[in-house]
Every structure is written in structure tokens, then in C-alpha cells.
Image (cartoon, rainbow, N blue to C red):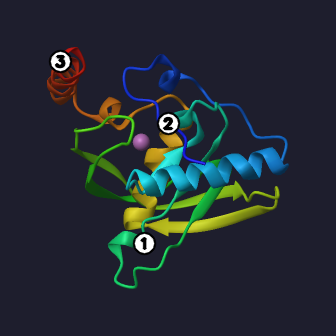
Amino acid sequence: MQLSILKFPDPKLKEISDTVKEFDSSLHKLLDAMAVSMYAANGVGLAAIQVGQPLRMFVIDISWSEESGEKKLYEFINPKLHDGEGKIVFEEGCLSVPGVTEEVTRKKHIVVDFQDRHGKPHSLVAEELLAVAIQHENDHLDGILFVDRLSPLKRRFVRRKLEKAITL
Ligand code: NI
């Protein structure tokens, strides 16, 4: 099932999501629907809050950027990011902020602890685009959009652009 994706300035996008406690079939259904919705929108990541569910989880698939063309779906539930290393600047966009892309500086290497859809704990070392995507999606769990990570000057510029876009 395809879910509709909340768009800025929906106040729900500012919510802090809750820890996932039930790893049941309704959770699996939601994760499946999130993946379908992400692919349908040509996104590389989608957090539960973007479809209105304040749960600490997101899906990611960055495989479009690789040559194989094979899908590789990641599901991160209750992620915890550890201190990262290095810096990477990447031009980010967000399914909840359509029409805007801006360069954001993130950690280049990260370690993330998380649970899978059955509640089993895992740890993953990620770098480059996967690390960027995890940090972007993890921000959604704390109500942070990538435009909040921009310099104040750039943020004002983007905000003006967005305000114009939604009043037209
Ligand atoms: Ni996003």
C-alpha cells in the first residue's frame, strides 16, 4: 500500500518519534508500505514520521547510485548513531521538502546500532552516501529537516523559496 508523504510545513514533521516496542505484523505492514512509498516517490530514504507515524524507524535504499541496479533495502528500527569520523558534503533533498536540494555537511563514516523488524539487534559501519542517508533519516526521528542543518543565511533563503512555493 502506498502512503501519502507529509510535506513541509506540516507540524508533524517537527515531532520527536517514540521508541518502537512491538515488533508485530502491524509494524511489518507499515515497514512494507514505507518501502513501497519510498520507491514510488523515487526517494532513497523515508522515515516513519514522514507518513505520519511517530516511530523511531526508517527505510533506505541507495542502490540506484550503484551499477548493479539491484534493490538493497535497509530497515533501521530504534537506531543509535555513534560518534562519526570525517566530513562529507552532499547535495541533499527530502521527500518532505520537494523542489529543494542543498549541500549539507555530515560525518563520512558512522557506526549505527539498530534493530531489525524482528527486534534483533545489529551494528553497521556505514560510509559515504549510506552514512549521509542514515544521518538524514535519523534527524527526522528528532523532528529535524535537512534545511535545519544549513547556515542561517542559506536557511532564510530556502525558507523564502518554500514559503513562495506553498502560497502559489
Ligand atoms: Ni528526508
The residues tagged by marks 2 and 1 sit, at their Cα atoms, a distance apart of 23 Å
Judging by the rendered image, the residue that carries numbered circle 3 is 168
Mark 1 lies on a secondary structure that is helix
Mark 1 within 8 Å of ligand 1, using the beta carbon: no
Crowd band around label 2 with a 10 angstrom C-alpha radius: few (<14), some (14–19), many (20+): few
Viewer-proximal residue among 143 and 83:
143
Crowd band around label 3 with a 10 angstrom C-alpha radius: few (<14), some (14–19), many (20+): few
Amino acid marked by disc 2: Ser
Judging by the rendered image, the residue that carries numbered circle 1 is 63
Of circles 3 and 1, the one toward us is 3
Mark 2 / mark 1, whichever is N-terminal? 2
Residue name at image x 52 percent, y 21 percent: 12
Above or below residue 127? Residue 54 is above
The residues tagged by marks 3 and 1 sit, at their Cα atoms, a distance apart of 35 Å
Mark 2 within 8 Å of ligand 1, using the beta carbon: no
Amino acid marked by disc 3: Leu
Residue name at image x 55 percent, y 41 percent: 3
Above or below residue 58? Residue 109 is below
Mark 3 / mark 2, whichever is N-terminal? 2
Viewer-proximal residue among 56 and 29:
29
Q: Does the residue at mark 3 contact the one at mark 2 (Cβ under 8 Å)?
A: no
x and y percentages locating residue 31 in the rendered image: 66, 51
Q: Which mark is residue 4?
A: 2
Q: Does residue 51 appear to the left or right of 118 in the view shown?
A: left
